Image (tube, helix red, strand yellow):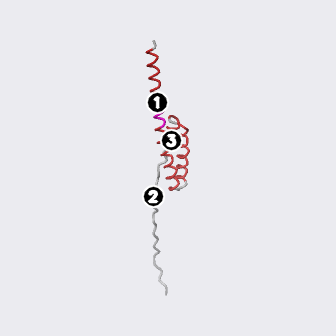
Amino acid sequence: ATAFGPTVTTFVRPGPVPNPPDFVLWSFFNTLFCNVFCLGFLALVFSVKARDKKITQDPEGATSFGRTAKHLNIAAFCLGLVVIIIFIVVLATSFSSLQMHR
């Protein structure tokens, strides 16, 4: 004789997939305002690739592309800031020398 009992089913909820940052807004800002040597544009390209990898559930690829976008954003922002400061200094000194010659 075989006894039939209730069937027990267990459901294991999968852990959350990590959501690495993609830095798209920062890259867009750098593309518009700090695009020295096209580093802002390159950062935007890597940010979009990171976002695509997040959508396809590839957190390792998204982290790699996001890290590259972050480093490019830092470089673009720093170089853009240096260029802006140099431009202001040159503009101020040329304006000052024009005032002296009058």
Is 90 or 39 nearer to us in this picture? 90
Q: Are marks 1 and 3 in contact (CB under 8 Å)?
A: no
Circle 2 crowding by C-alpha within 10 Å: few under 14, some 14–19, many from 20:
few
Indicate which label's residue lies in the foreground, 1 or 2: 1
Q: Which mark is residue 8?
A: none
Q: Earlier in the sequence, mark 1 or mark 3?
A: 3
Q: Quadrant location of residue 13? A: bottom left
Q: Residue at x 52, y 35 (%)?
A: 32
Tell me the distance, in whole angstroms, between the alpha carbons under discs 1 and 2: 47 Å
What secondary structure is found at the residue carrying circle 2?
loop
Q: Residues within 10 Å of mark 1 (few under 14, many from 20)?
A: few
Give percent across and percent down for residue 91.
Answer: 47, 24
Which element carries disc 1, helix, strand or loop? helix
* Residue at position x 50%, y 36% in the image: 34
Location of mark 3 (residue): 27
Q: Position of residue 86 (x, y in %)?
A: 46, 30
Q: Are marks 1 and 2 in contact (CB under 8 Å)?
A: no
Residue type at tag 2: Pro
Give the residue at mark 1: 86
Kindly identify the amino acid type of the residue bearing the numbered disc 3.
Ser
Would you say residue 32 sits in the magenta stretch?
A: no
Above or below, 101 relative to 16: above
Residue at the image position 46 percent from the left and 62 percent from the top = 14
Q: Secondary structure at mark 3?
A: helix
Q: Give the vertical position of 57 relative to 79 (above or below).
A: below
Crowding near the residue tagged with mark 3, few <14, some 14–19, many ≥20 C-alpha atoms within 10 Å: many
Magenta residues (range): 79-84
Q: Main secondary structure of the magenta part?
A: helix
- Residue at the limit of the structure toward the bottom, as seen here: 1
